Amino acid sequence: MEIKFYGGVGTIGGNTFMVEDGDTKIFLDFGQSFSYGEQFFTGWLGARERFGLKDHFALDLMPKIPGLYSPEALENTECSYCEPQYQGVFISHVHYDHLAHLSYLDPGIPVYMGETTLRILDSWETTGISGFGDHDYRTFRTGDVIKVDDMEVTPVHVDHSTPAAYGYIVHTGSGTLVYTGDLRLHGTHSHLTRDFIEQAAGAKPDIMICEGTRVAPEENRKNFTEQGVYDHSRKLLDDTDKLAFTCFYGRDVERMKTFHRLAKDTGRKFVVSTKTAHLLRILTDDPGIEVPDPFTDENMLIYCRHMNRYNKWEREFIDLEHCVDANYINSHQGDLIMQMDFIHFAELIDIMPEPSSLFIHSQSEPFQEDDIEDEVKHNWMDRFGLELHQAHASGHCSREEIFQIIREISPKKVYPVHTEFPELFKQELGTMVEIPTLAW
Ligand SMILES: [Zn+2]
């Protein structure tokens, strides 16, 4: 068994690992790292997507691998197209840093992901500007075993900041590999991660590919448990009769449920964006997950921004009784918790919240001190006199938990990925750790 690391090395996200056993070759994840191309791109300056992989290749941002990319992706490059040489791509969860490069993948290569993972991806593609191409999607649920030639791939659910996240156990003729994906132990579904650890340990793996997002020299950002997010926000809400805003990541369904519960328990209604409403709506009939239905739930409302033209998917929302506008928010301030994404801050001009309204920031604090977006966020807070509070539960295990998980699974060899500090693994765990290097 051979593993090639095409991404996720010394950086957070961009996981792209090729596992090869004889003639069988599969990929684990196909993502783009958060720092991707940052030496060349910023703000509106980005790769010219109309030229497929041309700019990515020219700037040495992506590897030129024959038999992997689609004809369209290669059309404007010096690489010529050839038939697929890989048998599958296995996606761990529906986050950009784990699947974004699917848009360049040859549609002849099957893409495996959880059933619910695909539903969420569909909603994301429908309501956002990102499209990841048409693929031969093959979905699974926990308990399924997928055979690829002589390889056996077993997805096992884990808890992360999006539903339907998986780790993988891969049996090959020449050894067993386990891959964590992204996982945590302090969320509402930590038993899922426990299941993965138990099964991974039982597989007695030769190799473990392990995430280490929070494996860093020191951690100075606040981290709550999911219940901690509830408790902290509950206290804030109990102490005010003003409007409360919140923001969270687009696919963090658990956080949506936390704020829904907060609204219900404090006699408020939870007002969500049309995007959030779309996602929750398509999950209402998913047997694997329980969510409130934004179209009918008595504790929910949907905020419809005033637009000259609505997207097709948004049009069915506009006439719903559950849809409200800025005037409604303005005249019911103390009765609401409202989702307010950064990109929609200009809505504050229409809503005109009373000074000292709450803003519960329920996503990561900025990674750098000189974060421009954070500065702009603060300017809006000041302009409207909003009180900013932080309440977020990370999607990732702490450093100590990661080391504990590795000890429990006890592989012969560990490759740290999805971390800026792989050498800390080596310091802690010694010779079992091999720091991966990029394969190109
Ligand atoms: Zn990730």
Image: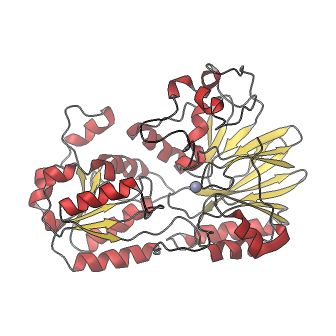
Count every numbered label the image shows and give the total: 0
Residue drawn 45% across and 74% down? Answer: 222
Q: Can you give x and y, in whole percent of width and height, for residue 363 in the image?
A: 41, 62
Q: Is residue 137 left or right of residue 321?
A: right
Q: Can you give x and y, in whole percent of width and height, for residue 218 in the image?
A: 58, 74
Residue drawn 50% across and 67% down? Answer: 394
Q: Is residue 317 left or right of residue 163?
A: left
Q: Quadrant of residue 40?
A: top right
Residue drawn 26% across and 58% down? Answer: 379
Q: Quadrant of residue 80?
A: top right
- Residue 398 position (above or below residue 70): below
Residue drawn 52% across and 32% down? Answer: 47
Residue 105 visible in rendering: no
Q: Nearer the viewer, residue 49 or 208?
A: 49
Q: Nearer the viewer, residue 125 or 375?
A: 375
Residue 382 visible in rendering: yes
Q: Can you give x and y, in whole percent of width and height, for residue 188 in the image?
A: 49, 71
Q: Nearer the viewer, residue 66 or 380?
A: 380
Q: Can you give x and y, in whole percent of width and height, for residue 179 in the image?
A: 71, 58
Q: Is residue 426 left or right of residue 379?
A: right
Looking at the figure, which quarter contains the C terminus?
top right
Q: On the rendering, which quadrant does ligand 1 occupy?
A: bottom right
Which color scheme did the rendering employ for the protein?
secondary structure
